[in-house]
Image (cartoon, rainbow, N blue to C red):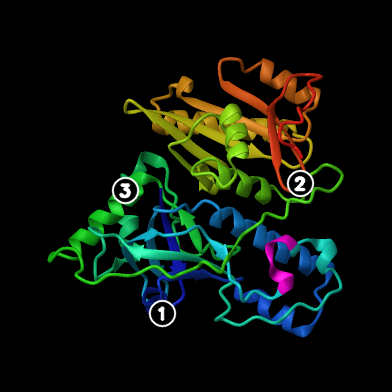
């Protein structure tokens, strides 16, 4: 799967290439608050929510995936690189920033270690693609001229910075990745580079452990659910988790998180399974608590939008899943009224280390499948 990763400037980009990795850090807006002392509960909640969001993005990237690098200072895109590892925790991370410690109850009223621009807490080893690595990048704004890109699905935002935050690691649809390679070829008429990028040795790095740690049986953030699916739907980190996800949601050829749809609305999880040149699309909406009528209606809008733009209004090619802790009768009644659509309800149950998904039927009990 292709991805696009943003770095701040040319010097950082060149550092990454010389050392064979890409690093991701906390958004700089948190640095001053951390330096001043213990964070308020409100600021700590915001910090943890941002980290969980980052984890969902990082867990999507798998070994051998295509990576394009967007250098923000120059507004250029370079590539193609290949992931030689998954994203891992730097061994230099202060103890309180390690993934298993990123819980409110562990950090509240605690002074966190100050961070600097050079503290890349999470890193991925990269190498140059043998046949698709080019010396010159292309103007990042050229991607917006491709009006037919992906027939209505557009994972790159209309501007490079979101309104509320900077997104460092973004998913790309395979169709988008092919378009970016075309632009690289166009800007490099002499062909691929004769130089190479060699991967960093990350044998002393540690796996990012998702801090699930439920509160009263409820996952503390939807982004942790998202991250769990990203980690295990394709090239899984946990084989039993993969088996569970496959049984509930089916196989995926492509999967991405926070994919834009209509009116700048974002689907939690969007993917497809391609077989015999035919794609079946899947949308997963995630809720930590009880689902509502508004949630199922939102899912229906996503399903109909995907059917219209990608499937010629064929609803049989689109499946929608609403995953939550519980479902009230209003949701069940709504589902019965929309039997012509492929909509399914999915319950989840968490432990400290895993999530279990199970298709919902009234009065059903969640199995203890690999809970311990």
Closer to us: 295 or 288: 288
The residue located at (51%, 32%) in the rendering is: 282
Provide the secondary structure element on which disc 3 rests. loop
Quadrant in which residue 358 is drawn: top right
Dot 3 crowding, Cα within 10 Å, few <14, some 14–19, many 20+: few
| Res 94 visible | yes
Residue on which disc 1 sits: 15
| Cα–Cα span, label 2 and label 1 | 38 Å
Disc number placed over residue 147 in the picture, else none: 3
Which residue extends farthest front?
Answer: 203
Q: Is residue 142 one of those drawn in magenta? A: no
List x then y, in percent, for residue 249.
Answer: 57, 30
- Magenta segment boundaries in residue numbering: 95-100
Residue 236 position (above or below residue 88)? above
List x then y, in percent, for residue 369.
Answer: 72, 31
Q: Is the magenta stretch mostly helix, strand or loop?
A: helix
List x then y, in percent, for residue 90.
Answer: 58, 71
Q: Is residue 97 one of those drawn in magenta? A: yes
Residue 95 position (above or below residue 281)? below
List x then y, in percent, for residue 276.
Answer: 32, 25
- Left of 284 or right of it: where is 38? right
Tags 1 and 3 in contact by the CB under 8 Å rule? no
Dot 1 crowding, Cα within 10 Å, few <14, some 14–19, many 20+: few
Closer to us: 193 or 317: 193
């Amino acid at each position: 799967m292709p991805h696009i990763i943003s770095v701040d400037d040319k010097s950082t980009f060149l550092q990454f290439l010389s050392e064979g990795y890409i690093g991701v850090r906390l958004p700089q807006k948190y640095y001053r608050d951390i330096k001043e002392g213990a964070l308020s509960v409100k600021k700590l909640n915001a910090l943890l929510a941002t980290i969980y969001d980052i984890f969902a993005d990082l867990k999507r990237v798998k070994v051998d995936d295509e990576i394009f690098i967007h250098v923000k200072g120059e507004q250029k895109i370079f590539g193609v690189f290949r992931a030689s590892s998954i994203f891992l925790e730097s061994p230099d991370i202060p103890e309180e920033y390690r993934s298993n410690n990123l819980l409110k109850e562990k950090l509240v009223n605690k002074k966190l270690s100050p961070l600097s621009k050079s503290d890349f807490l999470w890193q991925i080893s990269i190498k140059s693609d043998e046949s698709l690595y080019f010396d010159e990048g292309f103007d990042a704004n050229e991607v917006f001229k491709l009006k037919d890109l992906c027939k209505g699905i557009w994972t790159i935002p209309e501007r490079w910075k979101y309104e509320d935050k900077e997104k460092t690691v973004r998913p790309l649809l395979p169709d988008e990745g092919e378009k970016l390679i075309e632009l690289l070829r166009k800007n490099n008429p002499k062909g691929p580079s004769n130089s190479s990028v060699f991967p960093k040795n990350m044998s002393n790095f540690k796996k990012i452990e998702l801090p699930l740690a439920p509160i009263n049986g409820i996952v503390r953030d939807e982004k942790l659910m998202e991250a769990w699916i990203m980690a295990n739907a394709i090239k899984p980190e946990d084989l039993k988790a993969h088996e569970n996800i496959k049984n509930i949601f089916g196989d995926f050829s492509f999967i991405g998180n926070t994919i834009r749809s209509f009116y700048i609305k974002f689907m939690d999880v969007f993917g497809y399974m391609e077989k015999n040149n035919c794609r079946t699309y899947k949308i997963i909406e995630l809720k930590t608590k009880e689902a509502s009528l508004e949630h199922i209606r939102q899912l229906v809008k996503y399903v109909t939008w995907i059917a219209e733009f990608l499937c010629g209004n064929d609803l049989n090619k689109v499946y929608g899943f609403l995953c939550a802790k519980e479902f009230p009768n209003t949701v069940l009644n709504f589902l019965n009224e929309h039997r012509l659509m492929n909509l399914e309800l999915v319950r989840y149950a968490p432990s400290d280390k895993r999530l279990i998904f199970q298709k919902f039927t009234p009065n059903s009990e969640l199995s203890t499948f690999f809970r311990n």
